[in-house]
Image (cartoon, rainbow, N blue to C red):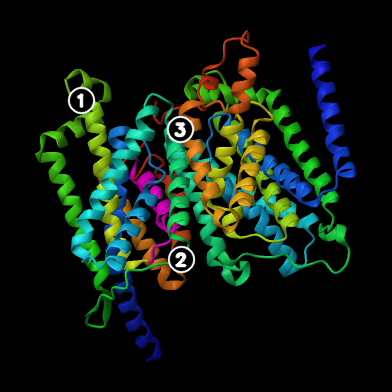
Amino acid sequence: MGMQAFLDIFDIYLLEAVINGILLGGVLALLALGLNLIFGVIDVTWICYAELVMIGMYAMYFMVQYYGVGYFIAAPFTILLVAALGALLHYLVIAPLLTAPPINQLLATGGVLFVLQSFATVAFGIDFRNLGIRLPVLAFGDMNFSYARLLSFLAALVGMVAVYLFMTRTFTGTAIRAIAQDRQIMALMGVDTKRIYLITSALGGALAGLAACLLVLQYDVHPFVGLSFGPITFLICVLGGLGNFIGGFIASFLFAEIISLGGLFSDLEWGYVLAFAFFIVMMFIRPAGLLARRR
Amino acid sequence: MKGQGRLAAWGVGLAVLVALPFVYRDPYHLHILVLILIWSFAYTSWSMMGRFGLVSLGHGGFMGIGAYVTALLWNHLGLSPWIGIPVSMIAAGALALIVGYPCFRFRITGHYFVLVTLALSGIVLQVITATRDYTGGSLGYTPNRASGNKLLALQFDDKTTWYLIALAVWLFGIVVWHWVDRSMARYALEAISEDEDAAAAAGVNVTAEKLKITLLSALMTALAGAIYCQYQMFITPDTVSGIAVSLQMVFAAIVGGLFVSLGPTFGAIITILLAESLRIGFGTKAVGWDNLVYGVLLVVFIIFLPKGILGSVLDRLKPQRKVPRAHEQEAVQIARPGA
C-alpha cells in the first residue's frame, strides 16, 4: 500500500516536472532563436548574448522597482533598449571584424562579455535584486505551476511566432533569409547587407530583451546571472545545429526536460550537469546537430 | 652564433631571475612576481593549443579541477599534494580527452569547438558550486594548514621559496613550448590549422595530433591551478574556474602575443600590473574596473593588433623575415565546419 501511495505522488511530481520543463523550454527556445538568428545571418556567435539579457533584466528592475513604472510599460522599453544594444554591438565590434577570421569576432564578443559584466558590477554592485512581484501559483489538481513560468512560456511563443511572421511575410525578413543562404550574391542583387546585418542584430537584441523581461519574473538579477543560462543556451544551439532554427527549438525543450527532471532528483545545478553529460553523448551520436543528415 | 647568443641571453636572464629574491626581499613585490609567474604558466599552457587555432574556453575548467581536486584530496583524505597534483592533472586530462575526442573525431571546429569548451568551463563551475557541502560553493575553499612536514604538504610561509617554485614551473612551461615548437607535431598542427582536409590527405592523423596537444595543454593548466591553490591557500570557483578565467587566459595570450614563447608571459605581466595598479589607485572601488578595462582592451586588440604587443614588436624588429604563414597573419585561422 505504501508503495502504491509513493508511486501516485511520484507520478504527480513527474508530470509536474515534465510540464515545468516544457515551460522552461519556451524561454530557452527564445534565447536559442536569437543566437541562431545572429549566427545564421551574420555568421557570428555572440558569446555575450546572455549578458545582454542581464542588462535587460537590470533595466526592468530599475524601471519597475526604482522608478515605479508598470511592468507592461517597462517591457517594451527594455526590448527597445536591448535591441539598440544589439545594433550597437554589431556596429562597434562586429562590423570592423567582418572580414577577420570568425574566431576573432567570437573572442571580441568575449571581451564585450567582460565589459558588460564588470559594467554591471561597477554600476549596480554585486547584490542580488528582484522585482518583488509575487505572481500567484496556479493549481491544476494536485499540481502547482508558477504563473510567471506560464506567462513566460506564452510570451516566448508569441515572440517566436512574431519573428516567424516577420521573416516570412515582410520584404526585410525575406532579405534576411536570403542573406543567410548566400552572403555574396545578395549584395550583387542590390540588397544593402550592412543594413540587413544591423536589423538582424537589433532583432537578436530584441529577443534577448524579451527574454530579459520574462526571466526577471523568475530569477534574481546580479552581474553574473548570464553565466547561469548562457552556457546552456550555447549547448542548445550547438546540439540543434548552429543557425538551425528548428533544431534549436527542439533542443531547447530536450534540455529543459533534462534540467527539470534532473532537478526533480537533486539540485538544479545537477540538472545542468546531466544536460552537459547528455550533450557529450549526443556529440558522439549526432556530431553535426540533431537534424543534420549523417555523413 | 645567433643561436648561441640567444642561449646566452636566456642564461643571463635566468640567473638574474633566480638571484632576484636573495637580493630584493620586498614581500609585496615578490608576491606580484609569484602571481605573474603562475598565471604566465597558465597562459602559456593555453597558448600551446591556441596558437594552432584550437581556441578553447574550457581551460577555466581544467584549472578549477587542478585547484579543487588537489585541495579536496588534502582536506578530506589527507593526501599530500605531491600525489594530489598528479591525480588532479589526470582528472583534467581525462576530461579533456572525453570532450576532445568527439570534437576532433567528428571535426567540431570553429564556433562549435569554442561553444562546447565554453560550456565545459561553465559546467565545471556549476559542479563546484553544486557540491557546496564539500567545496564550500561560491564562498571559496581553504586547504587545511599543515601541522607536520611543510614540504610534504607543499605549504611554505616564505615568499622566496614560492618564488623559486613558481619560477621553475614557469620555466618548465617555456621549455615545453619550445619543445613543441621544434617538434614534428608543430608542423602537423600548423597544417591542420590551415586546412584539415589537406593535412589529413598528406598523412597527418588529425584527431591524434589535436588530442595530444589538448591533453598536454590541459595537464599543464591543471598544474597551474594546483600551484595557484597551494600558493594562495584560498580558492573560489570564480578565481580558478569558469568562463571568466578562460576568457582571461585568451585575453592575456592575445595581448602578449600568441605566436612567440614569451607572449603569454608578457600578457600576464601587463594584465596583473594593470589590475594591481587599478586596485592601488582606486582601492575597494576598483572591483569590476579591472575587468572593464580588460574587456575594452581585448576588443581593441582583436580589432587593431591581433598579433599582440610582443608579437607585433618582434615583427617590427625583423621586417626581412620570411613570408609569414597564413595562420600567423591573423590571430587564429580556423577550418570551417564542413568546409
Residue B20 is left or right of residue A209, and the answer is: right
Quadrant in the rendering for residue A124: bottom left
| Amino acid type for the residue under numbered disc 3 | Ile
Quadrant in the rendering for residue A24: bottom left
Q: Check disc 3 and report the residue beneath it.
A: A103
Dot 3, how many residues are within 10 Å of its Cα: few (below 14), some (14-19), or many (20+)?
A: many
Q: Check disc 1 and report the residue beneath it.
A: A192
Dot 1, how many residues are within 10 Å of its Cα: few (below 14), some (14-19), or many (20+)?
A: few
Are callouts 2 and 3 both on one chain?
yes
Q: Is residue B26 visible?
A: yes
Q: Check disc 2 and report the residue beneath it.
A: A127
- Sooner in the amino-acid sequence: mark 1 or mark 2: 2
Q: Is residue A156 magenta?
A: no
Q: Secondary structure at mark 3?
A: helix
Considering only vertical position in the picture, is A98 above or below A251?
A: above
Are callouts 1 and 2 both on one chain?
yes
Name the residue located 72 percent from the left edge and 27 percent from the top edge: B178
User: Residue B324: which disc?
Assistant: none
Q: Which residues are magenta?
A: A220-242
Q: Nearest the camera: B93 or A163?
A: A163
| Amino acid type for the residue under numbered disc 1 | Asp
Residue A173 is left or right of residue A222, and the answer is: left
- Distance, label 1 to label 2, CA atoms, is 44 Å
Considering only vertical position in the picture, is B136 above or below A78?
A: below
Give the main secondary structure, helix, strand or loop, of the magenta stretch.
helix
- Distance, label 2 to label 3, CA atoms, is 34 Å
Residue A80 is left or right of residue B173, and the answer is: left
